């Protein structure tokens, strides 16, 4: 790349920043998300007209929809002032694109990474420090071999420009329409960054595809969009790796994940999320599973002030399968409201949901699940198992499954248990020489093993480490 | 909606009902307060999930079937001849035990809980008061209400003193007289269990299938008290019934048993809720139901463990059997746990008659239809076993048999 090109690039970037600042001044008088804001985002991204149209339509839907406030026992969203979103939408690059250097990061975040034993370079990437403007890090050496097979893995913004025909067909049309809920609509209006994964027919991607989310250069990384399309008989494991803890004042994360599992395909989507304790994490994640396809959701929800997240599978084709494995950990001041949704819309579909939650120091976890078996989904079966572990009396743990059965030839079972950490178990381990903390940690590690088993070793280790840190209470 | 009903309900009507029962001023005031609260009260909670309202109460056209002044019923009260036990029609209780009523009326079920409880409080014209003094055992109290009018509002109050014990069987059915169009039955039951008292309350609802039925049965326990409720639903067009027990005394207990059998286009919305508000409390919730034809069932079970409810044991099981393709079953067993010194679990299943069981029985020469009926009867056994009153158990069993025999396919 010539120095002239470099210069041009910089100039261009510089100009765009200037431009935004002007625009920001223009917005200041208006509260609430406006059409103008959306036009600027779209223009910044050099998007085709149809994407702008979609954003604007989503914006209209966002304004029309009410806040979800009538769910029993839901997290308090009163602090999420939609009208205040605007000032944040216009990114203040200097302070929001984050900390310029490692040193500028809040103690809590640095501490976490240090304790996780993550190398310096990785730390910078994970925490969003640095000058890279992509919203995820791609392991470059992997990418080449994927490309040979026709696998596409790129930044979602780029995919809009480079694969418009695919994106236009699938992006928030069939799976997660903006009309789904208020935050899906918000996401549709202001989305930015994320991953695009396309796996051609019959291709198996042996290594997991990994993406680390962090705030991108636009400062809107809280609205990243992930679109995964697995064509017939393909197989892929996508990992949204340890989502970077957010540390800005802006405290709304509203991502969107859409997964298309075509006939006979197999997709596993794994994520370990650890947002900062001032984040409202309100996501919409959904998969459409065709005939004989398999969708697996593996997720660990740590961090955040409040999370409302219910990954959903629509089992559309006969013989489609869904597996959910989730774990939630809520510490002090946290309300993790998470669960699973499965729609059995075809015969011979199967789903299993295994949910574990741990609450401690006044934290609140809730399993909220919906299993719907449509009329005609004969020989479908579902089994839901929830276990909650409570550490102390300030904590709360709820289980609210909803089962809607319109078909008689089915097998539906739900089971849940709640209990404290067993005194006898702790005593036994102590009598073998472990101290109280270690004993409890060991019990918790055993409790969450079904989740860690499903994750690649580095994530399993990380999840365990994160939980250990939470249990030490060292993160405050 | 509510304004429509209101237009059909007047203060004069309420005064007239109160006057007929010879009520004191304070009770009339309570009724009038409930009447004027109607406009602001919501219908009882129903579950909504995406694209689905589990029970649509707001669509009920009350105006067409609430007819407060023409209530007609036959009441059959059977009381044991035990010293001090009172089983009285409401009007009589008003005369003879005003202090008791003043203390307990509305103390367990707030009249303004929702629109339908307020409506009930304003308009009830019949009722029963059961009082069991300290240390007394009263067996086989029976209350049978036969509804002969378009609408009927019934009220039951059960008060037990320390270390007393009572077994009550209450039944609702419809008389032979034909009544045109939709009908409405509303029943409120308040149960006060004193210290170390034991209350076993069973209910069998077998109303005509043109009847919309709303019932709320709520109990509260003192230390070591027990309130057991059996709630069986066979009749009605639509039933919204809630059995709720607040375990307010240390070491108190409850067992809530439910059974229902829906056919044709019946809709049963059955709730069982328990609040563990004190230490060492135990709750056991068991419900089994069958849906056939186009019938629809909704089950909500809530186990709420309060912050101060140390050493709680709480269990819940719900099983629904579907006999037809057109039937539907919704279920939501909920655990809400605020104290970690808790052992709690819930389980729910929905399915059909086990194919292997059926195969086994037919291979032994049992005709398929008979085999299926036997399996359905067998399905209810775990619930029937929990019913301590023989008469109730036998009645439920025979109603289940009748219904199975009437099956057309």
Image: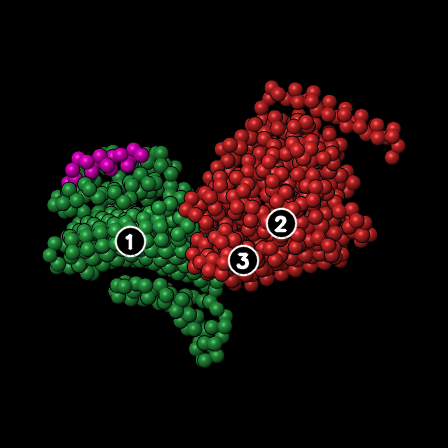
Task: Give the Cα distance between marks 2 and 1.
Answer: 45 Å
What hue does chain A carry in this figure?
red
Does dot 3 land on a helix, a strand or a loop? helix
Q: Is A45 displayed left or right of B115 in the figure?
A: right
* Residue A98 at least partly seen: no
Of pointers 3 and 2, the one earlier in the residue sequence: 3
Q: How many other residues sit within 10 Å of disc 1, few (<14), some (14-19) or many (≥20)?
A: many
The residue at which mark 3 appears reads as A446
Kindly indicate the quadrant of the structure image that contains residue B125. Answer: top left
Q: Which residues are magenta?
A: B22-37
Nearest the viewer among B104 and B149 is B104
Nearest the viewer among A281 and A203 is A281
The residue at which mark 2 appears reads as A462
User: Which mark is drawn over residue B252?
Assistant: 1
Task: Give the Cα distance between marks 3 and 2.
Answer: 15 Å
Task: Give the Cα distance between marks 3 and 1.
Answer: 35 Å
For image coordinates 71% across by 56% down, the residue present is A235
| Position of the N terminus of chain A by quadrant | top right
* Residue B301 at least partly seen: yes
Does dot 1 land on a helix, a strand or a loop? loop
């Amino acid at each position: 790349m010539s120095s002239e090109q470099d210069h041009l690039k910089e100039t261009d970037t510089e100009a765009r920043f200037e431009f935004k600042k002007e625009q920001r001044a223009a917005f200041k008088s208006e509260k609430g998300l406006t059409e103008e804001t959306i036009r600027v985002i779209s223009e910044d991204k050099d998007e085709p007209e149809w994407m702008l149209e979609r954003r604007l339509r989503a914006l209209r839907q966002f304004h029309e929809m009410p806040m979800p406030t009538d769910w029993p026992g839901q997290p308090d969203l009163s602090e999420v002032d939609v009208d205040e979103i605007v000032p944040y939408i216009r990114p203040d690059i200097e302070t929001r694109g984050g900390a310029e250097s490692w040193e500028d990061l809040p103690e809590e975040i640095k501490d976490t990474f240090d304790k996780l034993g993550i190398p310096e370079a990785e730390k910078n990437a994970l925490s969003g420090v640095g000058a890279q403007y992509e919203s995820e890090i791609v392991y470059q050496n992997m990418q080449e071999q994927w490309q040979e097979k026709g696998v596409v893995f790129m930044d979602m913004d780029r995919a809009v420009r480079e694969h418009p025909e695919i994106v236009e067909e699938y992006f928030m049309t069939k799976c997660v329409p903006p009309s789904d809920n208020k935050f899906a609509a918000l996401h549709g209006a202001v989305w930015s960054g994320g991953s695009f994964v396309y796996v051609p027919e019959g291709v198996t991607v042996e290594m997991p595809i990994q993406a680390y989310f962090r705030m991108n250069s636009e400062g809107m990384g809280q609205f990243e969009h992930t679109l995964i399309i697995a064509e017939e008989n393909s197989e892929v494991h996508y990992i949204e790796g340890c989502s970077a803890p957010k540390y800005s004042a802006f405290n709304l994360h509203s991502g969107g994940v859409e997964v298309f599992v075509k006939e006979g395909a197999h997709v596993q989507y794994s994520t370990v999320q650890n947002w900062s304790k001032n984040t409202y994490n309100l996501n919409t994640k959904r998969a459409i599973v065709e005939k004989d396809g398999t969708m697996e959701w593996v997720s660990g929800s740590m961090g955040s002030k409040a999370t409302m997240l219910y990954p959903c599978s629509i089992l559309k084709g006969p013989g489609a399968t869904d597996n959910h494995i989730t774990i939630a950990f809520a510490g002090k001041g946290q309300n993790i409201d998470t669960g699973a949704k499965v729609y059995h819309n075809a015969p011979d579909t199967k789903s299993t949901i295994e949910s574990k939650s741990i609450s401690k120091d006044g934290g609140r976890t809730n399993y909220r699940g919906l299993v719907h078996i449509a009329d005609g989904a004969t020989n479908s079966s579902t089994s839901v198992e929830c276990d909650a572990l409570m550490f102390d009396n300030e904590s709360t743990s709820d289980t609210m499954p909803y089962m809607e059965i319109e078909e008689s030839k089915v097998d539906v079972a739900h089971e849940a248990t709640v209990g404290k950490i067993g005194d006898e178990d702790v005593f036994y381990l102590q009598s073998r020489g472990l101290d109280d903390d270690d004993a409890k940690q060991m019990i918790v590690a055993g409790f969450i093993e079904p989740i860690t088993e499903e994750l690649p070793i580095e994530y399993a280790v990380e999840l365990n480490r994160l939980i250990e840190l939470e249990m030490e209470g060292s993160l405050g | 909606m509510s304004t429509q009903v209101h237009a059909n309900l007047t203060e004069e009507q309420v005064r007239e009902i109160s006057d007929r029962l010879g009520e004191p001023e304070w009770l009339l005031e309570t009724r009038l307060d409930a009447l004027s609260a109607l406009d602001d009260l919501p219908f009882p909670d129903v579950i909504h999930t995406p694209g689905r309202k589990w029970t649509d109460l707001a669509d009920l056209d009350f105006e067409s079937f609430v007819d407060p002044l023409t209530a007609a019923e036959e009441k059959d009260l059977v009381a044991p001849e035990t010293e001090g036990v009172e089983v009285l029609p409401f009007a009589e209780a008003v005369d003879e035990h005003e202090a008791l009523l003043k203390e307990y009326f509305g103390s367990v079920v707030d009249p303004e809980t929702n629109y339908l409880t307020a409506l009930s409080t304003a308009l009830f014209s019949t009722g029963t008061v059961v009082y069991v003094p300290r240390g007394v055992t009263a067996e086989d109290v029976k209350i049978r209400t036969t509804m002969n009018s378009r609408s009927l509002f019934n009220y039951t109050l059960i008060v037990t003193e320390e270390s007393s014990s009572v077994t009550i069987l209450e039944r609702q059915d419809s008389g032979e007289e034909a009544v045109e169009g939709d009908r409405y039955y509303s029943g409120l039951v308040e149960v006060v269990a004193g210290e170390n008292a034991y209350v076993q309350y069973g209910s069998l609802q077998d109303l005509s299938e043109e009847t919309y039925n709303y019932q709320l049965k709520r109990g509260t326990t003192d230390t070591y008290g027990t309130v057991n409720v059996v709630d069986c639903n066979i009749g009605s067009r639509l039933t919204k019934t809630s059995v709720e027990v607040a375990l307010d005394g240390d070491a108190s207990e409850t067992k809530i048993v439910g059974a229902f059998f829906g056919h044709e286009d019946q809709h049963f919305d059955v709730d069982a809720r328990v609040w563990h508000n004190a230490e060492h409390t135990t709750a056991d919730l068991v419900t089994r139901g069958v849906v056939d034809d186009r019938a629809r069932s909704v089950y909500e079970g809530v186990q709420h463990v309060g912050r101060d409810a140390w050493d709680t044991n709480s269990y819940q099981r719900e099983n629904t059997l579907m006999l037809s393709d057109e039937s539907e079953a919704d279920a939501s067993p909920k655990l809400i746990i605020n104290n970690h010194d808790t052992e709690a679990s819930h389980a729910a299943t929905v399915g059909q008659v086990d194919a292997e069981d059926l195969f086994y029985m037919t291979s032994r020469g049992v005709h398929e239809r008979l085999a299926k009926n036997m399996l359905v009867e067998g399905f209810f056994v775990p619930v029937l076993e929990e019913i301590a009153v023989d008469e109730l158990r036998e009645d439920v069993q025979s109603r289940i048999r009748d219904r199975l025999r009437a099956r057309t396919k």
